[in-house]
Amino acid sequence: MTYPVFDSKGIAGREVVGGPVTCTACGCRLERGSSDGTSAWFHFAPMAGRDARGCKVDCANVAHDARGRALVAAA
C-alpha cells in the first residue's frame, strides 16, 4: 500500500517541488529571503563574496530565483 503523501494524482498541472534550492553556478544550498517584497534565494551565510564553505564565488551576495539562477541587473 502506498502512503497517501506519495499519491500525486490530485495535483495534475502543478509543478511538484521537492528538496532544497541549490545555486546553478556553484552548487551551494540557498535559503529563502526577501528582496523588495519579492521572494528571492540567497547563499547561506555569505561572507564578503565567499560561500558557507569559504570558496570565493561571484554570486555569493546576489539574489537567486527559485531555480537557483543568479539574478543580475542588465547593464
Image (cartoon, grey):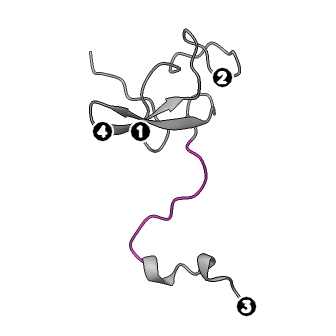
Rendered-image quadrant of the C terminus: top left
Which residue does the numbered mark 1 point to in the structure image?
65
Range of magenta residues: 12-21
Q: Secondary structure at mark 4?
A: strand
Q: Quick check: marks 2 and 1 in contact, CB under 8 Å?
A: no
* Sequence-earlier tag: 2 or 1: 2
Please state if 55 lies on the left or on the right of 64 as rendered. Answer: right
- For marks 3 and 4, give the CA distance: 41 Å
* Sequence-earlier tag: 3 or 4: 3
Which residue does the numbered mark 2 point to in the structure image?
52
Q: Looking at the picture, how far across and down is residue 2, in whole percent? A: 69, 85
In this rendering, the answer to whether 18 lies above or below 46 is below
Q: Amino acid at mark 1?
A: Asp
- For marks 2 and 3, give the CA distance: 41 Å
* Sequence-earlier tag: 4 or 1: 4
Q: Is residue 14 magenta?
A: yes
Residue 36: which quarter of the image? top left
Q: Residues within 10 Å of mark 4 (few under 14, many from 20)?
A: few
In this rendering, the answer to whether 65 lies above or below 6 is above
Which residue does the numbered mark 3 point to in the structure image?
1
The residue at 47%/44% (across/down) is 67
Q: Amino acid at mark 2?
A: Ala
The residue at 27%/36% (across/down) is 37
Which residue does the numbered mark 4 point to in the structure image?
38
Q: Looking at the picture, how far across and down is residue 53, in whole percent? A: 71, 21
Q: Quick check: marks 2 and 4 in contact, CB under 8 Å?
A: no
The residue at 61%/53% (across/down) is 19
- For marks 3 and 1, give the CA distance: 37 Å
